[in-house]
Structures are given as C-alpha cells and as structure tokens.
Image (tube, rainbow, N blue to C red):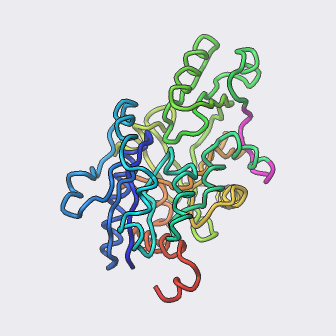
Amino acid sequence: MKVTVLTGGTSSERDVALASAVQVIAALRSSGHQVAVVDTARGFIPEADEGRLLPARVGVAPPSSQELEVLEHGLLFGALANLAAVREADVLFLALHGGTGEDGTIQTVLEMTGVPYTGSGPLGSAMAMDKDISKRLFRQAGVPTADWLMAPARVADAAALGWPLVVKPSKQGSTVGLTVVREAGGFDAAVEEAFRHDDEVMIEAFVPGRELTVGILDGKALAVGEIVPRHEIFDYECKYTPGMSAEIFPAELPADVTSRCQALGLAAHEALKLGGYSRADFRLTPSGELFCLEVNTLPGMTATSLMPQSARAVGIEFPDLCERICRAALPARQRRTA
C-alpha cells in the first residue's frame, strides 16, 4: 500500500505526534509499504530529511505557545488536500495528537479529499476531545465517570465536589494545563493556568486509586494495563520520559475487574461513535469502583506509548498493529484486495 503519515501539527502535543510518526513509519516500511510523510504544519518531508525533522524522543515539557504560534502560520489545510503525497495515498495514517489534529478539524478536511484515513471521523473525534460532552455521553451509556462542573465557577460550588479537585482544559491531552488543587487557595490560579491552554475549563472531583488503561481495536478490547507514575499523577513528563513510570501489561487484577474494565472501555468507545481504534483510561478506587477519565481517539504510538503495549500483551506486535489500523480505515472492497 501507499501510506502517507500525517504528523506534527500545532497542538501542545506536537512533539508526541512526531515521536509517534517515527515508530509508525519504521513499522510500516518493515512490512513492505511505501511510506511518505507530511507535517501538517510544514508540508511534505522528503525521506532524506526525516532524521533531521522527526525527533524520535519527546521532551519533558510540551512546546511553548510562542513556538506553536510560529507553526500556526505554516501549511494551510486547503493546501494539504492538494499535496500529491495526500491525493495519491491509499490510506493516511494520522500520527497526530491534540488540537486540530484530533478534534475533528483535520478529519473534516480529509473527508473532502476522499482518501481513507485512520482513526475516527469528525463527529466522534470532536465529541471525544470535548471532555464535558464525552462525560455526558459516558453517563448516558452507563460508564461511570467522576462528578464535574465547568468554569466559571465559584470556589464554594467547586468545593462541593470535595477536595482535592482536578482542574484541566476541556479540550487538551497529555495532562497539559492540568492541576490537582488541594485547597481553596490554589483554585483561582489553577483555573487561570487551564484557561491558558483552552477556552473551556473543567473542574472535576479527584478519584484516588490505581491508573488503568485499555486499548480498543477493531471493535474488541485489548489487554488492560496499569500505570504507576513516579509523580502523583501520570503527567506529561511521566508519560513520555523512559523510566518515569512503570507500565504493567497485563495489569495484575482480579479477572472480574479486568473484564469489567474491558467492557466499560468498549462501551465508552461506542458511546462516542469512534472508529477503528482508541484507548480508554480509568481509575480503580480502593473500594473497587471504576471511573472513566477519558478516551483517546488517536492514542500515542511512541516507543513508550500505552496502546502498543496493550496490543502486544495480546500477541499483536507493533508492525501488525499499524497494519491493522491502516486496513481498518480502508473501505471493505479495498481491504479484500490490499
């Protein structure tokens, strides 16, 4: 197949996207596919320049807002559809995370190109990225999630959720802009920090317990994993710095908890009308309750990412995972002949 990997972009998760792309490109080429690369902020990247323009590791912090603003003036979405690497591809592999790469914006543009792309469509992508909407849909589908409200909110209203609280941008990933607030004195600063990254801010009850995650692929739940970060929460540094967290696949859990987490992960995926694959994150409380934190429509595909580990634990190695993600994006007729 001719596969074009779309990566980069201008979200705070740009570095994660580039690191994901490095892994995906190598895996697809090892399977014999022709692979081209397009940075949605800069344009087509010739193979000779990949080593220079695609860093394989993620830093300990996201790019600054100033760096991202410069990139915003890069490749226009209208020009993207006219690139030969996009028009002539059999499938587009979206190694994008956050922002317009994951919120349904680029998916809407790609719908007009007629070229199949990996992941979810515009509607599912948008609903999953908006944490307020996704939590409403979780509850309708019977998927437990922590109580929340949206800013602006008085401290007294927020305190009714109980301390500590989690204050975070409603449409960001990788814990960018997230703060755990333990008392009223830190509330306003946390809200202000979250507003730096988004125009909507969520205030959520903190759920203590173990951090679990489960991948969804082709309508089935993969292995449940447990993340044990060095920090209190699984933050940006712990997610993308080797050695900053222990990730156990499969998680050491009672069989009924594993099956319940898998069922809820699949239910959350379906509630958001998602496509070929996703990853659902949960907290398991000391009393055994599961609460869904969020669902990632384009989960990370870096060397330390959770989705590949979830797949590997059920016997799906990384090249095969990339292959299956690509084939799931193809129309049924093409899947039979590709």
Residue 272 magenta-drawn? no
Q: Quadrant of residue 291?
A: top right
Query: For this view, does 41 lie left or right of residue 273?
Result: left
Q: In the image, what residue occupies the spot 53% across and 72% down?
A: 329
Q: Which residues are magenta?
A: 140-148
Front-most of residues 247 and 45: 45
Q: Residue at the top extreme? A: 185
Q: In the image, what residue occupies the spot 39% across and 34% down?
A: 69
Q: Is residue 196 visible?
A: yes
Front-most of residues 104 and 181: 104
Q: Main secondary structure of the magenta part?
A: loop
Q: Quadrant of residue 161?
A: top right
Residue 145 magenta-drawn? yes
**Quadrant position of the N terminus in the picture:** bottom left
Q: In the image, what residue occupies the spot 27% across and 50% down?
A: 55
Percent x, y for residue 318? 40, 67
Q: Is residue 118 above or below residue 286?
A: below
Q: Quadrant of residue 86?
A: bottom left
Percent x, y for residue 120? 59, 61
Q: Is residue 279 above or below residue 322?
A: above
Q: In the image, what residue occupies the spot 56% across and 26% down?
A: 195
